[in-house]
Image (cartoon, rainbow, N blue to C red):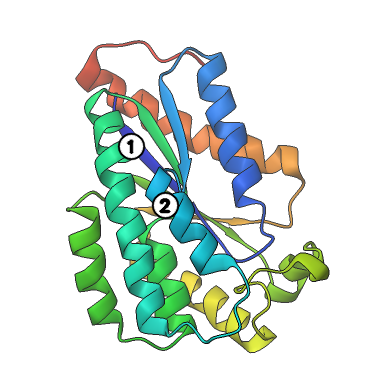
Amino acid sequence: MALFITFEGGEGCGKSTQAKALWRKLVRLGIPAELTHEPGGTALGKELRYLLKRKRQDRLSPEAEVLLFAASRVQLVNEVIRPSLQEGKVVICDRFADSTAVYQGYGRGIDLATIKAINDMATAGIKPHLTILLDMPADKGLSRKNARNHDRFEAEDITFHHRVREGYRQMAAQEPARWMVIDATLPRNQLKTIIWNKVNQLLQAMQAYSGKTVPK
């Protein structure tokens, strides 16, 4: 019952919390599931995450950002995502290719067609069945973060984060069948329920193909 679900959103939206909550729910129900994240999820990805997110004295160019994220993604697809899907697991990924389109495309201004070509190579054609966008005003999301510990992206000016949010909303509008947009200011437990109801619908729909009964 392979299913690939990604969580997207701006800083402080709660996507990591909700991704973990969904993974725990699936595990409790006995549904094989894998939880991973970007950048990271592999030994190489962990090293690249440090390079990408830590504050630097030098300026990391937007083009270098795109390629470093792509390198992490290639490794994650090859080591974790593709093998887990081939085993019939539900794979939950905290950020994926859409983050690069939004942060380096809408945010940094890199040509979206160029990013798409790089993402197509990095993902080897693997695309989420469902992308959950936890939408929240940029200033509200950033207020949830400890300013002293801001990473490179969190430390960007507010206009950057506004562009990121608008980029997410535009991408979701262009592909409504894949994207599910949720108001991230809702209570945490309400968000869990909304997300589970949607995921359960997908699992039930896949039941006819697998012949397995999905616990409710």
Cα–Cα span, label 1 and label 2: 11 Å
Q: Residue at x 48, y 50 (%)?
A: 46
Residue 146 position within the rendered picture, expressed as x and y whole percent measured from the top left: 81, 64
Q: Nearer the viewer, residue 200 or 94?
A: 94
Q: Secondary structure at mark 2?
A: helix
Q: Which residue is mark 2?
A: 45
Q: Quadrant of residue 213?
A: top left
Q: Looking at the picture, does residue 167 appear above or below residue 178?
A: below
- Amino acid type of disc 1? Val
Q: Residues within 10 Å of mark 1 (few under 14, many from 20)?
A: some
Q: Is residue 125 left or right of residue 213?
A: left
From the image, which quarter does the N terminus lie in? top left
Q: Which mark is residue 80?
A: 1
Residue 184, quarter of picture: bottom right
Question: Can residue 38 be seen at all in this image of the molecule?
Answer: no
Q: Position of residue 129 (x, y in %)?
A: 32, 44
Residue 181's spot in the image, x, y percent? 52, 57
Q: How many marks?
A: 2
